[in-house]
Amino acid sequence: MTSRIGCRYLRVTARGRELLHVESLDVAARSALAVLGPNGAGKSTLLRALANLGGLHRTGQVLLDGRPAGPRELRGAVAAVLQRPILRHGSVAANAAAGLRLRGVGRAEARRRSAPWLDALGVGHLAARSARTLSGGEAQRVAIARALAVAPRVLLLDEPFAGLDATTRADLLADLRTVLDGLDTATLLVTHDRHEALALAGRTALLVAGRIRQLGPTGRVLDEPVDVDCARLVGFTNLLPPAATGRTQLCAARPEHCAIDGPGEVRIPGTVRRVVPLGGATRVDVDTAAGTLTCLGPGEDEPAPGRRVVVTVADQHLRPIRGRELVEEPERSR
Amino acid sequence: MDVLFDGVAQALSLLFSGDEETWAITLLTLRVSIGATVIAALVGVPLGAAIALGSFPGRRVMLAAANTGMGLPPVVVGLVVTVMLWRSGPLGGLGLLYTPTAMVVAQAVIASPVVVALVAAALRQVDPEFLVQMQGLGATRLRALAALGVEARLPLLAAAMAAFGAVVSEVGAAQMVGGNIAGQTRVLTTAAVLATSRGEFGLAIAFGLVLLLLAFAVNLVVTLAGQR
């Protein structure tokens, strides 16, 4: 794998506080990397540091094709889509052409080259409309078409689906995946939603407190968290200490794999604290010696709060993880 | 009633007969006001942009000062500029008092806070991530700023027009630093004041009409531009 965009020892500080410290990261052409992290983990900072956007105080190197890249090279190679689709006054067609226009391409040529991208993103029929009349999903499609129209060698997506409703987001993710699969572009997606990572990226990095904790194929990263923070990030929110499981290590399990009085080998007694119906499923919080555990089940005859129950998990659904005390905390430089 | 009627009739005949003095006064008014507006824009646009986009200490204080400055009494400005340019004053050696240049200076001082405050407000209407997004599409910082200017062109135009409107209708400072010298520093407002005090209502109404016409033209341009 040859790296299209990457970084070495990339550090970003603000007022003496370290926001980001990434020793090494690479994204190859024709591939997508998702950077998954909680709010405030430094995801957007990483994306902006890579693209040299927003006047960050950064040190270290950004690499383009394996070579250190300056602002000019990055400007030529990168296109970014931000969380809010920032469109300009004017028609959709003019907005799609805006990226090319900013790069000095003539008006007619920019329109001609950007039009197919509106079609590819499913908004070709809106070309003559004023950008101000678009819905959130349509505007984000236009913003993505605008970025793709410049034929970027690196595409940076900063939570572009976060403001969209579930259906709109699923459709857009599917469309974008189809488009990206045909392109010689390295894509970096920043998100807090593991489903987006799964839908778009072959590899995923987990970013916690400015540091990459885990990096690998998306399926594995989402299924085999290495520590407590990573486990919580990818949905393994139930932590089971050795005393509860009989294992030698701390373990984590997904709520959807924990059942009330089920057949699982690991059995933890407790008291029902509350029952929350969630439409199709039911969430049951149970107070146990291991802390509060959450079970997510189909919810037939759910127990009443206060009842004594046993939370059960199958062995195969337990993931051994490192406890927080073993996790190296990022150093705070002052 | 006759006074008003005769006045308007006389005013119209003055304007349409192409009275040389009236037109000279109008042209000087335009020259001084446009000059002052241009200077205020040169000072105020970068300053307003810095206040809107920058993050330096004292930013809020400057914005508050500019907002206060929008209500700056022209008489105070006239007084200060007069003192500065007075023969024995700090800049007396320049010999600028009672010249159109002095009027341009005074009116630029009046218009600058207007431009600063309105430009800052105009640029803050645009999404704070606008510059980042433009650079994220490959724009240089300069090009991104230009795009921001285009995006906010209507409120920016409104800022310039507000500044022009403030100076073209201003009378106190123009009188004090210009002196209302016939053929040299007499502008529409000071001429109207003088004509009124002499009871030459026809002349005063003529000047008033031209002023109204200028104000209307300014607003027409803004309104038409706003509907594009």
Image: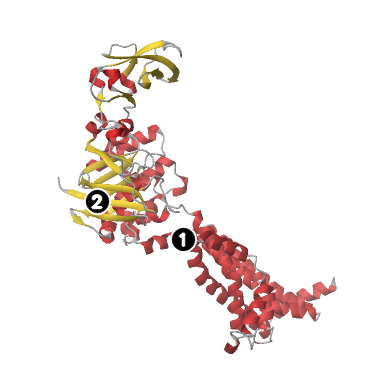
Residue A121 image point, x, y percent: 33, 42
Query: In the rendering, at what x and y percent does residue B45 appear?
Result: 50, 67
Q: Are marks 2 and 1 in contact (CB under 8 Å)?
A: no
Q: Using the image, name the chain to which the residue with label 2 belongs.
A: A
Residue sitting nearer the eye, B87 or B208: B87
Chain letter behind tag 1: B
Residue type marked 2: Tyr
Label total for image: 2
Q: On the image, numbered disc 1 is attached to which residue?
A: B56
Q: Secondary structure at mark 1?
A: loop
For residue B90, the mark is none
Give the residue at the far right of this rendering: B1
Q: CA distance from mark 2 to mark 1?
A: 29 Å
Identify the residue position indicated by label 2 in the image. A9
- Side (left or right) of A214 relative to A57: left
Classify residue B78 as left or right of residue A61: right
- Identified at 69% across, 79% down, the residue is B175
Residue A182 locus on image (x, y percent) = 22, 43
Q: Is residue B28 above or below residue A5?
A: below
Q: Amino acid at mark 1?
A: Phe
Badge 2 marks a residue whose secondary structure is strand
| Picture coordinates of residue A224, whole percent (x, y) | 24, 29
Q: Is residue B76 visible?
A: yes
Residue A198 in sight in this render: no
Q: From what the image shows, is residue A307 above or below residue A321?
A: above
User: Do pointers 2 and 1 mark residues of a single chain?
Assistant: no
Which residue is painted at 31% across and 43% down in the image?
A330
